[in-house]
Every structure is written in structure tokens, then in C-alpha cells.
Amino acid sequence: MDNSTSPTPGGRPRRLTGAVLSPRWEPVLLAVTAAALAAGGIAWLAGAGGLADLFWALGTVSAVVPAVGWVVAALRHGRAGVDLIAVLALGGTLAVGEYLAGALIALMLATGRTLEAAAQRRASHDLRALLEHAPRSARRRTGAGVDTVPLAEVGVGDLLVVGPGEVVPVDGRVESAAAVLDESVLTGEPLQVERPRGETVRSGVVNAGGAFELRATATEQDSTYAGIVRLARQAGAESAPVVRLADRYAAWFLPLSVVVAGLAWLISGSAVRAVAVLVVATPCPLLLAAPVAIVSGLSRASRLGVVIRDGGALENLGRARTLLLDKTGTLTGGRPRVVDVIAAPGRKPAEVLRLAASLDQYSPHVLARAIVDAARERGLGLSVPADVDEEPGRGASGTVEGRRVYIGRLDAVDLEPSWARAVDNRALLDGAAVAWLAVEGRPAGAVLLRDPVRPDAPRTLRHLRAAGIERLLMLTGDRAEPAQEVAAVLGLDDVRAGLSPADKVAVVRAERERAVTVMVGDGVNDAPALAAADIGVAMGARGSTASSEAADIVLTSDRVDRLADAVSIAVRARRIAVQSALGGMLMSLAAMAVAAFGLLPPAAGALLQEGIDVAVILNALRALRVDRSARPALTPAAEALVHRFAAEHDDLQDVLEAVRDAADRLSDGPGPQALAAVEETHRLLTERLLPHEYAEEHQLYPALAPTLGGPEATATMSRAHAEIERLSRRIATHLRLAHADGGLTPGQLDDLRSSLYGLNTVLRLHFTQEEENYFSLAP
């Protein structure tokens, strides 16, 4: 079957052979050929040889007609595939009266076609979500008021009104004081941005604040979002057709078979001998081995939550050498999380987070949700705020426990205290967003938020390299600084930041010139790049419908490590397919030699070929088996422990903040507040952190050791536990000295501060390593 393609209206290729025989009819052909073979066998057993030949001949003819159509379609597109040998063999059996051999070949051919249809069937790759998201009308301000008009009637210079939650209809310039926008549909970034008066806004983004006025700078057709839709369609239309594994091998097997059959006829003068050669040369291993292995691979992948939409995508995935990944939602979590809480002198980080979350409970802002989630994860009791007033893009204020509280942005004039300036600097260095907390008009603390790297991302990238991916790149619409930081942590080969959807498509096209390329993304802005890649992979659990429909592979669970599993499965399935095809062809070549010497009649040759089929299929079915080396399997008990200690990591974030806060307090000198902060930190270490580390050492690590290959696999983590305990003892010793001297002395400050900062660093690194190496093993 030729796999040449032409674009569908949705932009993705479709198979031309569907005009010859629709895939839904291939099971019918299988049923007809099987019934003809069985009916002929019953007639032969009943002594009705003529009737048996008639049934077998009918079964042969039923396969010849569509097979000729497949060959004609292949030849029309300049390709002579494996089906040509089958047609020659079927025609030959009819010509020399070897009807049983013809029926057997017909059944084999129908079986292969049915299996391949199952492996190659594509789902619709249209872009419904892109089109559904696109606005159809706009609200235009005129002298008489505001009128709703079709989008096509909007012209450059028109003044439009964009209400809360509405999609910006065309590219334009903000005419109001400011606009608060959710631009994730274009950039993939979850953080809302504020566009001041006079700044440009692209179509397709969502108004996340109050209504604002927009001066149109482009028409509908010339706007950004319409361009994304066109890009996705064009990129899908130019995707290269997949050449079947069987057809690639047929390039030399086909002429060899014809030459051997011709020589056998020429030398012996027996057409039956030539037909016998063609019968055993019928490429059963090619027609069956690859589809069975590929279908098996598809089945294995689907059990892991990886939906691969056709066999061609699995084949290509097994040959991929370059992987392009979107950052937000793919390598990172896709939503901001609290990474640190800083308290003003005299306050505690937990109090800062509790007050901020209490006020933010009713705010829809993405940062507010992250703050509330962090407080609840740490078990902080939230109060009910009163008189809440929120200013879009600025922050919220209200009364909490009788005090006037504000959470949001602060002007530079409000950040005079040295600790506040230090927080601002730290946020800049860490690439984090800051939500400031003010109580009664005075800065009381700050919450730092960032979209963190997925815990499973580093392990996934290591597995991808082990599976054969040679080049890893990150593409993102985000700024260069946070993108470079993520790339450094993950050890990527290259990073391209600040990219528009069109830029991403250009990078994908350039990489496709070098190697088979995979693109992974989760947003509407990724859809064109997914369609342009050899294989597009969509994060389907929280990703957009558009990215899923523009992709060849969809990860149904929110776990990027499933991509590494899919690549391993694809590589193994393709390897087994090649092994089966080559092994089967070698057996067929041996049978061809025997038939050429007249030692194997056509019917016996057909039966022998069926035996080869069975061997090939059994070998190909190995692709169904689980490759134990791909992913360590946890016992239920070990998985339960992983979940338990992962939850404890969330609970212990306030301890890490207390360690850092105590170190900061020492910068102001050895006063009572500094001593109290160190004492509180020591209490948290003794009561909460050290028991957690002890339990990990004596419960979690022994449970993981068999899965990871022995206790040596956790030895470096055990060494970190020893360092954490050493630094904790050092802090305790400083406290004993302070109590003996009536307070901290200046001579203690440097070492104590060094111990606290060191402990904070070790703890954060240790937690990250455990989450990456151990906690990511559990779904």
C-alpha cells in the first residue's frame, strides 16, 4: 500500500489509498478471504475438488482486485511497493491453476492490510480549538456608543472595547490607562502581564482585568492570531509522508524475487516453478512483521497513557535524533509556585504567608491561587477577610483580623528598608515574581513565586538521551534569563528564547533539515510547531485542545517522563520489526532457492510461507512485553513511602524558610531577635526536619534500593543526610555557647551564619535531588 499523502481541509495529510479501498473495508476483505479458504477446505474434505478450487479461486480474485488498485496507486506516485510481488503471485496462481496457494496468499495479504490499517490509521488533525478560540465579532466605539460588529468590518484605527474575560479581537494599542492580560495562549507563560497605555497588544490574548479600550492597528486577516491558524495549516500540509518500513526493504527484495522467478522459468521452462518462487517470495515478513510489531508498540504505549495516532508516527519516533521542547507546561509545571517567603524583622515567614493567603482567598489571579495553595499545603489556618478591594494588575487590600492588609505590587518608594531591597535583588537574580505584603501601610514581608522545573524533567531527558536522542533544544516565548536558567539545570544543548509561534516553526523546519525531529508542547501557541515537526507531541492532560489535535502523539497524563517511555517503546518496536522482517526475508530467500530447483510446489510453498508468517508474528509480538530496563518498577509499599515523603517535603518548606530567615537576621548583629530566630530554627530542625531525614534514611532508602540496583544508588543521598545532621549539631553547639555567655557574641556570627546558609543550600539541593531521582518514579 502506498502511503503518499495530500492535504486534508484541516491541514494534515491524508492517505490517497483510501480511494482504492477504505480502511474500514480491509476487515471485510480479511473475512472474505478467510471464508473462501475455509469453504474450500470443507469442500475438499468432502471430496468436491472442483468446488474447492472454485472457492479458493474466488478468494484469490477478491484479493487481486484491491491489490491491483494498491499497486497502481503506488506506481502513479513513483513507488513500487511490496504489493507488486503479491499481485504477481496471485495472478500466477490463477494462471497455473494453483488455487489453494492463491487463497493462502490472499488471506496473508488481507491479514497484513488489516494489521497495517490498525497501525497507520490517523485521527483528524484539524484545528478546531484554534478556530473556536478566535473571536467572531468586536465591540467598536462610535459617537453614538458601542456597537457589536463582525470582525471582518474592523479597520485600522477603530477604537474597540475589550471586556473582562474577552479575547482581544485584533492587534492593537492600549488606549486606557492599562490592560491586564493573560498571554499564555500565545507565549505559554502563565503569569499575567500589565500593558500600559500606548503599548501594543496581540490578538488572541485574554483580558484578565477590567474593561479597556484598544486602538486597532491591524485588520482581522493581518492580526497575530489569524497568522497562527494559517501557520498551523501550512505546516501540517507540508509534513513529509511516511514511507512504510516494508516498502523500504521492498526496494531490493522486489527485483530480486522477480529475477529469481524469471531465471527459474527460463532455465526449467516451467511456469509452475516460477509461480512457486513468487509464492514463497510473497513478502509475508514485510507485510506482517512491521505492522504486528508497530501495533504491539502502540498497544504498549497506550497502557502508559501515550496515545500514538498511527504506526508511521511510532516508526518515526524510533528514528528521531532531535527533540525540541517548549518550556512552560512541558519542562516546567506550567503554573507559578511559592519558592520562598521572606518576613520583615520581627515577623515570621509562616505569618507572612498566612496573612497573604487569607487576603488572596477570593482573588482569581494566578499568583493569588499559588499563594493560597502553598498556605493550605503547609496546614496554615486562614482567616476570613473583610472589605476586600482588588485593583487589576496591582493587588488586593482588605481587613484581616482587624488589620488593614495589602498584597501585590509596591512602588520603589515603599521599599526603603534594606531587607526589602535585598528581596527585590533576590527576585531579580532568581527570575521570580514578588507579591509584597503590607500591614497597616508598612511592608511586612514578601512571597517569591516561580514556575519551577518539573521534578521528572531531568530524569526524562537522561532517558531520552539513552534512548538515542542526540540533540535537545528548548523553545520558549519567555525571556532569555529564566530560559537559560532552566536550560542550565537540565543540561540542554541549546535554548531559543523570546520566540513567537512563527519563530518556533522556523526553528523546527531548520532542525528537520538535519535529523528526524520531535517537537513537544502544550499550548495553542505550540500547535504550528507541532504540526511542522516530523513528530508532534502534545501534553494533553492540561494542554490545549489545539496542541493535541495538531500532534501525532498525545501524553494523556501530566507527566513528561512518559515521553521517554514512548521513545524507548518506539525504538524497541522498530528494532523488533526490522529483526522480524530481515529474519523472515532470509527464510523466504532460502525457500525461493528450493522452489527455483523444483523441490517446492506452489501449494507447499504457500504453507511454508504461512509457517514463516507464524514465526515472524511470534517474534514481532515481543514488542508487547514490558522492557524492564526502561523504567524501574516500584513495589506498592515503596510507592506509598514515596508519596508520604513527597508530601512531607511540601510541609517542610517553612523549615527551609526559617533557616534562611535566621541567617538573614544575623546580618543585623547578635541581638535578641537574631538569637530568637536561631532558637526557633533549631526547634524546627529538631522536632520536624531531622526526624524526617532519619525516616528517609531507615525506611525510604531501603525500600528503594532493590528497584535502583542496591544500596549504593542511595549512598550519595545518605551522605547528604550526614551533612544535614552535622550542620544541625553545629548550630546547636552555637546555641549552647550563646546561652552560656548570655547571648550571641560577635565572634560566633560568621560561623553561625555560614552554617545556616550552608544548611539552607544543602537542604534545597537535597530536596530537589530526591524529588528528581526518587519521587518522580511514582505516578
Image (cartoon, rainbow, N blue to C red):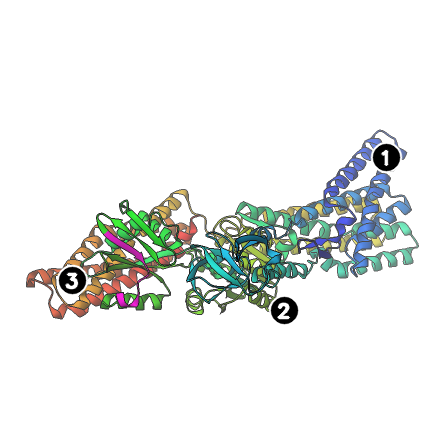
Mark 3 — residue? 674
Is 407 within the magenta?
yes
Which comes sooner in the sequence, label 2 or label 1?
1
Left-right relation of 543 to 408: right
Image height of 316 relative to 48, above or below:
below
Which comes sooner in the sequence, label 3 or label 2?
2
Left-right relation of 335 to 669: right
Left-right relation of 578 to 355: right
Mark 1 — residue? 52
Residue at x 22% of width, y 51% of height: 403
Crowdedness near tag 3: few (<14), some (14–19) or many (≥20) residues, C-alpha within 10 Å = many
Which image quadrant is residue 711 in?
bottom left
Q: Disc 2, disc 1: CB below 8 Å?
A: no
Between residues 721 and 353, which one lies in front from this camera angle?
353
Marks 3, 2: nearer the viewer: 3
Marks 1, 3: nearer the viewer: 3
In the image, which residues are magenta? Answer: 404-414
Which image quadrant is residue 755 in?
bottom left
Which numbered tag is attached to residue 513? Answer: 2
Hey, what amino acid is under mark 2? Answer: Glu
Which comes sooner in the sequence, label 1 or label 3?
1
Between residues 662 and 153, which one lies in front from this camera angle?
153
